[in-house]
Amino acid sequence: MSNVFSIRSGIPLEEEEKLIEEETRRIQEHEDQELENERKKNLELIDRVRSLVESGRLVGLVVMGFDPVTDLPLNELQLNGPSINRTKLFAYVGMLEMLKIEVNEAAMMSPTINADGNIVDPYVSLENEDGDYEI
């Protein structure tokens, strides 16, 4: 055990490094589990969409997504063919505008980093243990 203590926590530096590694591992496991849950939900959605297309109840598709490894976007637009009425393309524009607003609202709720280095997450409560609000 070394005699070097952390300025932040006051505990030995080796202990703090072990705690940080454990917390990092726990966060990674949680993120992996969330990614697996998202993958399952996406596959269920694709199955429902596939059944609608096969039954003839869905025509015209707009698909968007990201590759989590490369962070490259995927977008596919299928609006060709005799089943797409050209005058209904304005309806697609309206749906895309609605989706744009929803994605914009979700993006505005993303965590941000202030100039002083503090992370602000809208989903995390600002109340501390005493019931007071932290600023």
Image (cartoon, rainbow, N blue to C red):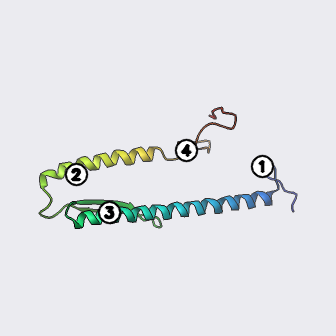
Mark 3 belongs to which amino acid?
A: Arg
Q: Nearer the viewer, residue 47 or 90?
A: 47
Q: Which mark is residue 57?
A: none
The residue that disc 3 covers is: 48
Q: Residue at x 80, y 57 (%)?
A: 13
Mark 3 and mark 4: Cα distance apart in space: 33 Å
| Element under disc 4 | loop
Q: Residue at x 44, y 64 (%)?
A: 40
Residues at discs 3 and 1 in contact (Cβ within 8 Å): no
| Element under disc 1 | loop
Which mark's residue is nearer the viewer, 2 or 1? 2
Mark 4 belongs to which amino acid?
A: Asp
Mark 3 and mark 1: Cα distance apart in space: 51 Å
Q: Which one is earlier in the sequence, the residue at label 3 or at label 4?
A: 3
Residue 32, percent from left and from top: 54, 64
| Element under disc 3 | helix
The residue that disc 1 covers is: 9
Eyeballing the image, is 31 above or below 133? below
Q: Which one is earlier in the sequence, the residue at label 3 or at label 2?
A: 3
Mark 3 and mark 2: Cα distance apart in space: 20 Å
Mark 2 belongs to which amino acid?
A: Tyr
Q: Which one is earlier in the sequence, the residue at label 3 or at label 1?
A: 1
Q: Nearer the viewer, residue 38 or 71?
A: 38
Crowding at label 3, few (<14), some or many (≥20) Cα neighbours within 10 Å?
few
Which mark's residue is nearer the viewer, 3 or 2? 3
The residue that disc 2 covers is: 92
